[in-house]
Amino acid sequence: MKRNIFSRLALGNKLLPIFVILVFTVTYAPLIVMMIYSFNSPGHDVQIESGYAHEYVRASEKWNGFSPVWYKRILSDKHLLRALVVSVIVTFTAVPVSIVIGTMTAFALYRFKFWGKWIFEQTLLSTLLIPEVVIGISLLLFFVGFLQIKLGIRTIFISHVAFTIPLVTLVVIARMQRMDPTLEEAAMDLGADEIATFRKVTLPLLMPAILAATLLAFPWSFNDFVISYFVAGPGSTTLPIYIYSMLKVGVSPVVNALGTVIVMFSIILVLGASLMQRLRKS
Amino acid sequence: MNYLERKHRFLFFLRRHQPLKICLILSPSVIWVFLFSFIPLLIMIYHSFMTKGPLGQVLHIFTLANYEKLSFLYLGVFWRSIRLAGMTTFFCFIIGYAVAYWIAIYGGRWKNLFIFLIVIPSWSSLLVRIYAWLFLFRDSGIINYLLMQSSLIDSPIPMTFNEVGVLGCLIYTYLPFMILPLYASIARLDQSVLEAALDLGASPFNRLLKVTIPLTKGGIISGVILTFIPAIGEYIIPDLVGGAKVTMMGNLIADKFLSFRNWPLGSAITTALLIIILLLIFVYAKSEKQSGLFEVQES
């Protein structure tokens, strides 16, 4: 048996776990450091009531002691809170719309064969893969150069629905492929019409997939920066656009606190949803 | 009664006319996707053949000048984008395959937890992750600060505002998109095949090369596509981590639209990027195995 140097490295025995631990460390180190430093005291007096939170304060690498001052500053920043409201409005209107449309699309794509199906599927997949810059620019040209409508919350809403539909569709389709088609047939045989079958059989069976899709679509829409950046007008700054403007000014410790809140929120969301599903199963 | 009767008539009518039913169910998404994804791309391609007016407006006169300009001015940026995206994909594949393999084979009952840990950061804001990266690695960041405090180095090591920094952040961001499809396809492997390979005298490395990797080809293709295509058009990472020194195609496009107001030239660059991407997607769609894109998140 020929043994070369690679087999000596014993892939999978000792080296691999160390490597995996390293990858996990690198994945989480920046976030954890950010969270710790969000409680770093500025070391000197900072004015809290100052309108803009990102009025430039240099982030200190030195640990000055514990202080919740940056969190207080988030709450005192009116522009930030307004951006948050805009983001919430857009996400909570766009995602439900795209959930409904996406589920319908998935149902049609899975159930029926029709002309142009392959092209439509590939178009959906492409809109997921095409870089956000391309989508953002083309929408900007469409709204401003072609339709000549004002950029604002409306255009952000339209764009968000457009890019979350493919996501919802693909998640729901993946689940549908594993669904037992005889259940629906049985319902039809027992006298339910199409609408009743869909409401009483198909939809409950799809609920986990719809939940998963919602869970994916919410952070996608809420955290989207690039597309929103191109189609947002004055007065419709979303939270990610606001964070971007803060980053452009400089690394400000307020972003540490804000980032901590966002990361914690998404972790709680994911954990909550997975716990919910686990409870449902048992 | 009247309502029920009408409903039954309607359903009966739909049963007889299948195409109409499909149209009804599919129309919202077809209209939305057609109107707000497809048409905008066509309009962008149209703009790429137009002329820029002296005030930055678009004159509707046909010209090929934008593409001429693009082909000799911006080849460097194109090449850098392709190179960085290619290197990102390569490193993500090496790292991602090892991690996915370990989770799928040795993960045991903690498999789902590990995959969750991989995915969770990418559910939070990309901007926040880039910020956290910068906070750690910039010249006055935590790492340089600690190294200087312990007097290992005299001046900060530049880990941002150069290509290596951008590459690092790209890998950091895109790793989950590589790991998910890889994990899905490795987890689906029949373990007895792997054992058989060892029994028949293959060394672990040979087994990886000749059995494991060919059997997980579907996941590899998905992972490569999912990493390469978004990476080549990346905008925020080179913008925030690279600054003005490392521009990729995404920055070039945004600059042309937002700063220089040269929409036709910007459209031409975007169209060129789109063509590269559509070619890749076409190859991907034609390849028989597309697996593991959206299966893991459900578990």
Image: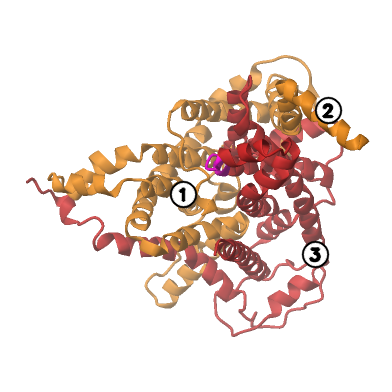
Where in the figure is residue A20, as x and y percent of width and height? 36, 61
**Secondary structure at numbered mark 1:** helix
Chain letter for red?
Answer: A
Q: Is residue B212 above or below residue B40?
A: below
Circle number at residue B180: 1
Q: Are marks 3 and 1 on the same chain?
A: no
Chain letter for orange?
Answer: B
Relative to the observer, which residue lies in front, B115 or B124? B115
Please give the count of numbered marks on the rendered protein: 3
- The boundaries of the magenta stretch are A174-180
Kindly identify which residue carries mark 2.
B9
Where in the figure is residue B261, as x and y percent of width and height? 74, 34
Chain letter behind tag 1: B
**Relative to A186, B225 lies left or right:** left
Kindly identify which residue carries mark 3.
A81
Between disc 2 and disc 3, the foreground one is 2
Q: CA distance from mark 2 to mark 3?
A: 52 Å
Q: Which residue is located at x 39 percent, y 76 percent?
A: B151
Give the residue at the far right of this rendering.
B2
Q: Which quarter of the picture shows residue A164?
A: top right
**Relative to A136, B93 lies left or right:** left
**Secondary structure at numbered mark 3:** helix
Relative to the observer, which residue lies in front, B37 or A249? B37
